[in-house]
Image (cartoon, grey):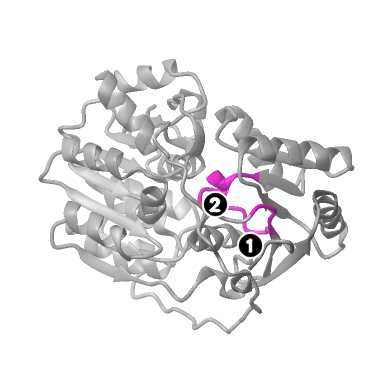
């Protein structure tokens, strides 16, 4: 796809893949025991300290085309991660950014990356994201910031026809956005060569590693130009995340703007049940509550998500389902209906934990227990955004011996 036009989504490439938006390499993890008391917490809404940025977007020394596009997008004052990242990234240094979800990380790396590509047409970037939804969001923002630049791009992810994707790759795109599994598939097919890629971006590093993509990421990064600029963004910098970043970066500048857990403004509680019939009836009652507006429900498998969605529809609820077994077109339609409030309930697997950016979700319901506490935090982080109080309810079977 050419970035001379920003509204021609159909020409951007698509691929095919299995669950979690990135190929078949995701390994099923063993459920971690989580004390149910960790699912109970009162929201702490503290008045956020007003951040006074050092720069305005107009102050950044970027190509005039980017400045025009940013102004058209209404960008005036940068968020903390943008304010601190962009000036450093424009100097060519590696960046490790630690920030909460929804803080503007995408623009923080796209602005300096696109500036570099415009000024040096031999430069190429590969941007990796854990899910199809997040990859699409990155691509959408890329089109807006790079509008009119003539840069070519390819979006490598699953669930749709491979042919448009192959067509875009034959045009030798400067911008490659995708999920690790699908990108690696193309490298193995020899339809993608990345030896000349000199900019690498890994978004949501912790989530990609948690989903089992470490081998794919290692192979991809080892195949790029070793004299490159690298961007790593993550909500945490612990254990294997730190080790992996140290392995692939050189003297990075660490930028920390995380301001506590994303779950601090989410009121959390459990819903106890004894039988399956009682469980579904309690969910029914929750969704009927006048205070429950837009709800994201998590279940653990494709089959269970479909079954629960069918049950809710049979009970008169307007709902949609989203999981890795659906085609990308189906996922896009379901997500759009949810974003536009044409349906108020979305049933999902953890594919949605990072990759759905819907600001007005009031409730997250864990109909199945998350596999790890980190998954739990990712799930409930979908609620309580944009300064609102959110609610998270986790179903816990009482007969289990805790």
Residue at figure coordinates x 63%, y 62% from the top left: 383
**Lower position in the chain sequence, tag 1 or tag 2:** 2
**Disc 2, SS:** loop
Q: Measured from the top left, where is residue 358 in percent x and y?
A: 62, 53
Mark 2 surroundings within 10 Å by alpha-carbon count, few (fewer than 14), some (14 through 19), many (20 or more): many
Residue at 51% over, 35% down: 19
The local crowd at label 1, few if under 14, some if 14 to 19, many if 20 or more residues have their Cα within 10 Å, is many
Q: Position of residue 318 (x, y in %)?
A: 82, 42
Q: CA distance from mark 1 to mark 2?
A: 11 Å
Above/below status of 383 relative to 202: below
In the image, taking residue 87 as reference, residue 65 lies left or right, namely right
Residue toward you, 148 or 347: 347
Q: What residue sits 54% from the left and 52% below the top?
A: 353
Q: Is residue 96 magenta?
A: no
Does residue 140 appear in this view?
A: yes
Q: Is residue 366 above or below residue 228?
A: below
Residue in the foreground of this view, choosing between 33 and 88: 33
Disc 1, disc 2: CB below 8 Å?
A: no
Q: Is residue 364 magenta?
A: yes
Identify residue for label 2: 353
Residue 142, percent across and down? Answer: 40, 43
Query: Which quadrant would the C terminus be assigned to in this image?
Result: bottom right
Q: On the rendered image, what quadrant is the N terminus found in?
A: top left
Q: Residue furthest front?
A: 401
Instruction: Give coordinates of residue 144: x percent, y percent.
Output: 45, 43
SS at badge 1:
loop
Residue marked by disc 1:
383
- Which residues, given as a range, are shown in magenta? 348-368
Q: Residue at x 29, y 58 (%)?
A: 240
What residue occupies the far left of the structure in this picture? Answer: 227
């Amino acid at each position: 796809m050419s970035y001379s036009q920003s509204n021609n989504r159909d020409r951007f490439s698509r691929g095919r893949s299995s669950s979690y938006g990135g190929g078949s390499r995701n390994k099923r993890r063993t459920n971690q025991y989580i004390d149910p008391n960790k699912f109970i917490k009162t929201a702490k809404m503290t008045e956020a300290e007003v951040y006074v940025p050092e720069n305005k977007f107009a102050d950044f020394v970027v190509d005039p085309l980017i400045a025009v596009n940013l102004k058209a997008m209404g960008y005036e004052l940068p968020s903390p991660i943008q304010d601190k990242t962009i000036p450093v990234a424009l100097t060519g240094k590696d960046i490790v950014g630690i920030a909460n979800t929804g803080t503007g990380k995408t623009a923080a790396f796209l602005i300096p990356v696109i500036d570099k590509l415009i000024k040096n047409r031999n430069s190429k970037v590969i941007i990796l994201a854990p899910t199809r939804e997040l990859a699409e969001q990155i691509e959408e923002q890329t089109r807006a910031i790079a509008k009119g630049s003539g840069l070519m791009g390819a979006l490598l992810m699953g669930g749709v026809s491979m042919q448009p994707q192959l067509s875009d790759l034959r045009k030798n795109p400067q911008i490659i956005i995708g999920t690790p599994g699908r990108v690696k598939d193309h490298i193995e097919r020899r339809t993608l060569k990345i030896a000349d890629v000199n900019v690498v971006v890994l978004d949501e590093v912790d989530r990609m590693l948690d989903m089992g993509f470490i081998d794919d990421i290692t192979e991809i990064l080892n195949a790029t130009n070793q004299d490159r600029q690298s961007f790593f963004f993550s909500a945490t910098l612990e254990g294997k995340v730190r080790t992996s970043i140290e392995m692939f970066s050189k003297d990075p500048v660490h930028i920390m703007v995380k301001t506590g857990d994303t779950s601090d403004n989410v009121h959390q509680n459990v819903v106890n049940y004894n039988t399956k019939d009682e469980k579904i009836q309690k969910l029914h009652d929750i969704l009927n509550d006048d205070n429950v507006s837009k709800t994201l429900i998590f279940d653990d498998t494709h089959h269970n998500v479909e079954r629960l969605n069918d049950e809710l529809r049979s009970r008169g609820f307007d709902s949609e389902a989203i999981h890795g077994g659906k085609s990308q077109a189906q996922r896009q339609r379901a997500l759009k209906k949810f974003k536009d409030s044409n349906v108020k309930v979305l049933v999902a697997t953890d594919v949605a934990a990072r990759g759905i950016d819907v600001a007005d979700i009031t409730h997250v319901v864990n109909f199945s227990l998350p596999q790890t506490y980190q998954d739990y935090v990712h799930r409930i982080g979908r609620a309580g955004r944009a300064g609102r109080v959110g609610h998270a309810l986790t179903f816990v079977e009482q007969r289990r011996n805790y």
